[in-house]
Amino acid sequence: MTTWSPGSGFAGVLAHAPLAQVDLNRWMPLGFVLLAIVILIALLIARRREARRIETTLAEIQASERRKLEALQATERLAQETEQQYRALFDDAIVGMARSTKSGPFITVNRAFANMLGYDTPEEMMAKIRDISRDLYVRPHERVEAVRRMTEIGTIETREIEVYRRDGSTTWILAHTHEVRDADGNHLYFIGTIQDVSMRRLLEDKVRQSQKMEAIGRLTGGVAHDFNNLLTAMLGYAHFAAHKLGPGHPMHSYIEQIQRAGERAETLTRQLLNFCRQAPLERQTFDLNLVVKETGYLLRRLIGEDIQLRMQLHPDGTFVSMDSGEASQVVMNLALNARDAMPGGGELIIETICVFFREEDEQLPDELVPGSYAQLTVSDTGCGIDTATLERIFEPFFTTKQRGSGTGLGLSTCWSIVRQAGGTITVESAVGKGTQFRVYLPLADAEHATVTERAPVLPTPEAEVSSGRGTVLVVEDEDVLRRLLTEILEVNGYQVLTATDGEDALRLSNEHPGHIELVVTDLVMPRMNGCVLVGLLLQQRPDLQVLYISGHADHALLDQAVESGDGFAILHKPFRADELARAVKEAIERAEVAARPKTAAVAAAEPT
């Protein structure tokens, strides 16, 4: 039995058989075949591996491309969403936004900016404004300067600009603009946000105008106060001179002219005080129709025959609550202004009606609250008023009349009077189409009317004042006025103590051994005003009567005067000699009446 061993087979034969015994020619082809098969198998295995590697690489490339495509698509979606968000923010922003170039046209504007300037669409605005400097800016050099600063200096421009609207009018905008550049620093465009600040500027102008009016009012009040002191002295001494010289004296007519000039100056001073709201008021409830009728009688003689006066008055009456003299002044001033606007004649219409305003009414003037008002309308068919004049028409000292023909206080005084009464004035006019003033005053209850008839003002002789008795302490810091007061009171029989200020008055009161019935003191004085002085004097002399005199009528001091007690009166400057004498006489008589019950009570308490 033959057994196999590791040395058996073809290899064993080759290993153990003698080389000469091996038939190489027989086995050589088979070896080549086997070698070829091995090589082929190796190649197949290598190609299979290469194919798998290629497949793996292709799969990785495809996956990478898919990831890149997905990332690109995501980026595009994000860009679209960002563009939509930007467009929404740009187009729907409540503030104006715009991009522009150096050369002039806009790249894009949003709807808010277009609507701000009166355009319906951004496209309409961009088509209309081809050159920003010329078509948008009221002052083109401002645009040129802003571009220079942004490009050369690199600043962010924040500035207020006056620009044209679609209809050709102008408005003010606030622009925040900066330059956008590329990575190389080259200019791309300007971008900015825009706000409409026209209303803010209007309010600022009103505030500045209000502050100016307040400052003028304080100045006017101070000047009028000092002028009233001088005017009181001038009228007082003119009265003395006329009385001593008598009507037959050659100089009497000159003194009368001085008095008339003083009275006109008094009217001017009252206008000044009305303007700054420092004139003393006597509030009454009356029918405005009565004032219009009364003023109409005088107007018919003043306006001339070539002007037709027509009055249309509300049949049920228009009751208001204010100073009736001031109401007459308003009607007179408006009517005389209408007369001056019709040098060639025309028609003057004065009308009164009652109106009621609701909150939603467009006709409600800005200065009024909803409610019932008496409306006084003064219309003329004159030359009319231009727009520039209308904007300043109620300013004090502003006048379009020739130098020396007007003070510029008429309409400003009317405005102040009406506003003080809780109303307002509006004006409508156009050049060549006449003017219409409307005065609105709050309606008052007719049942509370304090004036039902107004007697015509006629010149009356001066009332005779009987000789006075008692001691009067006069306190006045103005030297000329203090001498006049002393002379008037001494002429009327009073013993007079004069003091230059509050401290001097306190000293005289301490040193005077006898009774002092009355103190006549200026309300406004340096170092110590009249109210403080009276308070100190009443501590020394509780039964002292008080007569305040003032040309200022400061409200705070008047409140103090009211709180100082019942035994006081106020005489406003300028006053006449007889007015002072009458006021002093009445004050001393009040003291005597007040003392009688006290004397009777003391007498009743004494033992019999």
Image (cartoon, rainbow, N blue to C red):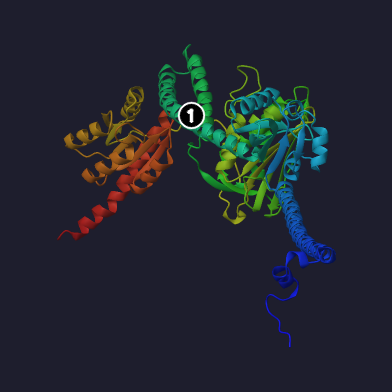
Q: Which quadrant of the structure image shows residue 605?
A: bottom left
- The x, y position of residue 551, in whole percent, is 43, 32
Disc 1 crowd rating (10 Å Cα; few below 14, some 14-19, many 20+) is many
The answer to whether residue 209 is left or right of residue 170 is left
Count all numbered tags in the image, as a single digit. 1
Relative placement, left or right, of 284 versus 240 is: right
Would residue 447 be found to the left or right of residue 293 on screen?
Answer: left
**Which secondary structure, mark 1?**
helix
What is the x, y in percent for residue 591? 31, 45
Q: Let me know if residue 461 appears in the view.
A: no
Please tell me which residue is depicted at 74% across the width and 75% down the height of the picture: 9
Which residue appears farthest toward the left when viewing the image? 607
Q: Where, quadrant-wise, is the N terminus in this rendering?
A: bottom right
- Where is residue 333 drawn, in percent x and y? 64, 32
Along the viewing direction, whichever of 582 and 187 lies nearer the viewer: 187
The image quarter containing residue 61 is bottom right
In-front residue for pair 229/145: 145
Residue at 75% across / 26% down in the picture?
103
Residue 466 visible, this orientation: yes
Looking at the image, is 244 positioned above or below residue 66?
A: above
Q: Between 330 and 290, which is closer to the camera in this rendering? A: 330
The residue type indicated by label 1 comes to: Thr
Q: Quadrant of the C terminus?
A: bottom left
Q: Can you identify the residue that label 1 sits on?
A: 220
Judged from this view, the residue extending furthest toward the top is 250
Q: Splitting the image into 4 quarters, where does residue 324 fall? A: top right
Q: Position of residue 301 (x, y in %)?
A: 69, 28
